[in-house]
Amino acid sequence: MTEYLWKTADMIAAMAGRPIGSMPQGITGISIDSRDLKGGEAFFAIKGDRVDGHDFANVAAANGAALLVVSEAKLPALGRITTPLIVVGDVLEAMEKLGHAARQRTSAKIIAVTGSVGKTTTKEMLRQVLSACGSVHYSPASFNNHWGVPLTLSRLPENADFGVFEIGMNHPDEIRPLVKMVEPHIAIITTIAAAHLGNFRNIEEIAAAKAEIFEGVVADGHVLLNRDNSQFDYLETVAAACRIANIHSFGVSAKADFRLVDYQSEGDSATFWAVIGGRTVEVNLKAPGRHIAENAVAVLAACYLAGADLETVVAAFGDVTAAKGRGQRIHLRAPGGTFTLIDESYNANPASMRAAIALLEAARSGEGGRRIAILGDMLEMGEHSAEVHAGLAAPLQAAGITDIWLAGPDMAYLRDALGEASQTVYRQDADELAAYILENIRPGDVLMVKSSKGTGFGRIVSALTTNFPAAGAA
C-alpha cells in the first residue's frame, strides 16, 4: 500500500485550488525542481528570481510527477500537458497554505533555529541526535528562506516525532512570516554577531531582526538564548515582551541554565561536559571546536525540553561529525606524507572567522608542517568591510598563525594590516590562489579554508580533493 505524504483532496482543500484532470489519490512527496523530482511527487511550479517553474512543467510531467501545482495566469501557456493540475492564484502562496495545514495536523515537537553563526550546524546536530529518539523531519541543506521554509514545512509527514527548521535572514522582517508558519515549541538563537552588516546599521539591529523568531513560538513554548552573547539582556527582554512562557539560557556563564562546564579536544575529536536538567553529562564529538561544543549545549537543552531521552541523545552525539563546508576534516596524501584540510568554505562573517582561526590554532600539524589559514572575502559587510577584514589580523597573530594565504578584493585589507609580520600570500581570486596552493602543499600541513560561499573558495577545496587522494576523513 502506498504511503502518501498528502491525499490529493486534502491538498486541494488546504490550498483552495482548482483541480483539472483525473486526480491521483495522493502524492508521495513535493518537489520544486524538475531535475530531481521522483515519480509520484507533486511538482510546484514556483517562480523564482532567476527561473520560472512553469517553464519546466513538461519536464516534471515527463519525469513522473503525479500532479502539477500551477498558476492560473500561466495556464494558457502550458500547452497540452495531460498530467493532472491543481490551479492556484500564486504557487508560492499555495505552498505556504499547505505548509500551514501540515503544521496544524502534526503532533511533532517543532524546533526552530536561527542565529548569526552556527544555525545550520546546530540544525544538523539536532537532526542527527534526535534521529536516535524517533522520526525527524528537517530542513535539508540551508532551506531557510521565503521558499525553503514553506517547502520544508509542506513536506512534514503527519506522523513525524520531531520537526527541525532552520530560519535565516539578511534583512529585517524576513524571520517574522516564516516563524509564524513554523510555530515552534522551542526556538533557539545560537548567537548574535556581525553578519550581513551591509544591510544593518549595527549589531543591535541584527539582534532585533533575529528576535522576530519569538513572535511565532507557541503559547506554552520555550526559547533558548546564548547567555555569553552581548545581546542576551536585550533578547531576554524582547522574549518576555512577547510573552514567551519559558525563557532559558545556555553557555559558559555560571548564570546559564544549561551550562558548558569543560571542553577538551584531541586531534579530530573532542569531549565536553555540560549541566543539563541538573545533571552533568559527558559528551563525545567527532567534530572538534569549542564553538561546536557551545552549540551542542543548546542542542542538548532543546532535546531535553522536547522530552527526548537524554542518555540516548548523549550517546548519539558520538556519531556527530562536521558537515561539508562547515569544519569537515579531510586527510589527503601528498608526495612524502599526508596533510589535513579543514573545510570551512561554506560561509563566513567576523565571528565565524574567529571561531575557525581558533580551530586552526588547536590543530596539530605534522612534522615539518605548517598551520595555514586560507581566507577569502566575507561578503555583505557593506561600509564595514575594510574594518572587519583588517580586524582579522589580531586573532591570527594571537593564535600564532603566520602562514596566511588570501584571495579577494576585500582580503587586501587584511594583507595590508598583517604587514611583514607573517608569511602572507595574496592572489586576486580563488582560482589563482588554488593554483598556488596545489604547487606549495607539503606533508604535515594543516590547511583551513574559510570564506563566504559567493567567493568560490569551494573550488579550492575541490581542487585539493581532486588532485590529492584521500587518506581517510574524520
Image: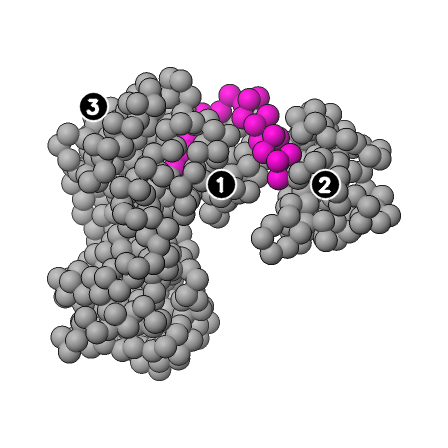
Residue 114, given in percent of the width and then of the height, sits at: 37, 39
Residue tagged 3: 278
Q: Residues within 10 Å of mark 3 (few under 14, many from 20)?
A: few
Q: Is residue 190 magenta?
A: no
Find residue 126 and report its horizontal and vertical position in percent: 39, 37
Name the kind of residue labelled 2 in the image.
Answer: Ser
Question: Chief secondary structure of the magenta span?
Answer: helix
Q: Say which residue appears at 41% left-offset and 45% top-offset.
A: 171
Q: Are marks 2 and 1 in contact (CB under 8 Å)?
A: no
Q: Which residue is mark 2?
A: 71
- Describe the element under mark 2 as helix, strand or loop: strand
- Local SS, label 3: loop
Q: Nearer the viewer, residue 208 or 82?
A: 208
Quadrant where the C terminus sits is bottom left
Single out the mark in the foreground, 1 or 3: 1
Which residue in the protein does label 1 denote? Answer: 139
The N terminus, quarter of image: top right
